[in-house]
Image: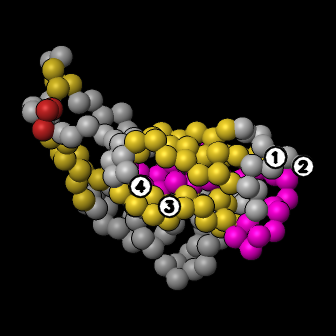
Amino acid sequence: MVAPSPDWFVGVAGLDLLEAGDWAAERVIDLYPWDAGTDSGATYTSSDQPTVPPTAISAITGAPFTPGVPLGTLTFTRIDLVSAVPPAVELALQAWPNPFNPRTTVAWDLPITGPVEVAVYDPRGRRVASLLDAVQPAGLGAVIWNGRGDDGRIMPAGTYVVRVDSPAGQARIKLTLLK
């Protein structure tokens, strides 16, 4: 995104990183401004004014930018020592039973020890229950959600999202509470 417009951006598409059948040592790409065609505000200070219908993505070739002058560059550099890149860690997450009534187990396999926060969100994105906020050891862990909010009330039937935040990243899983 290029501020202040919510629909201006820079990007790269269709870039060939091969050179004579091998990975290129380096590519430096000029980044020019584009308009996504979704906001029609006339000035920087205009409120969001959705373009109806949206227009096609197009290059911005005039004001407020200088024509032909890139906003920046993006450099791709080949790294020959792949072993120098640490392996990605992932947070595995599952829940059972799902759908459930009155309770479900949310379990994870944490690749590294660290703080773990487990929370339940309603369909509007509001946090309704905090299930865990503590340091957890690497390995298997689990909590049970009894279908109640932090206030103790039974939550209505519907779809909820459990979000687990950990040193290995964030994972989410949808749960369906039946009545």
From what the image shows, is residue 33 above or below residue 103? Answer: below
- Over which residues does the magenta segment extend? 149-173
Asked whether the residues under the numbered discs 3 and 2 touch, taking CB atoms below 8 Å apart as contact, a structural biologist would say no
- The amino acid at mark 4 is Gln
N-terminal label among 1 and 2:
1
Q: SS of the residue at dot 2?
A: loop
The residues tagged by marks 1 and 2 sit, at their Cα atoms, a distance apart of: 7 Å
Look at the image and say whether residue 164 sits in the magenta stretch.
Answer: yes
Pick the front one: 22 or 92: 92
- Picture coordinates of residue 122 (x, y %)? 72, 60
- The amino acid at mark 3 is Glu
Q: Can residue 70 be seen in this view?
A: yes
- Picture coordinates of residue 102 (x, y %)? 80, 49
Pick the front one: 47 or 175: 175
Q: Which mark is residue 179?
A: 2
Colour theme: secondary structure
Residue at point 22%, 54% (across, down): 73
N-terminal label among 3 and 4:
3
Asked whether the residues under the numbered discs 1 and 2 touch, taking CB atoms below 8 Å apart as contact, a structural biologist would say yes
The residues tagged by marks 3 and 1 sit, at their Cα atoms, a distance apart of: 23 Å
Residue at point 60%, 46% (across, down): 106
Look at mark 1 in the image and give the residue it sits on. 101
Look at mark 4 in the image and give the residue it sits on. 136
Q: Residue 48 carries which label?
A: none
Residue at point 30%, 34% (across, down): 15
Look at mark 3 in the image and give the residue it sits on. 117
- The amino acid at mark 1 is Asn
Asked whether the residues under the numbered discs 3 and 4 touch, taking CB atoms below 8 Å apart as contact, a structural biologist would say no
Q: SS of the residue at dot 3?
A: strand
Q: How crowded is mark 1: few (under 14 residues within 10 Å), some or many (20 or more)?
A: some
Q: Is residue 60 visible?
A: no
N-terminal label among 4 and 1:
1
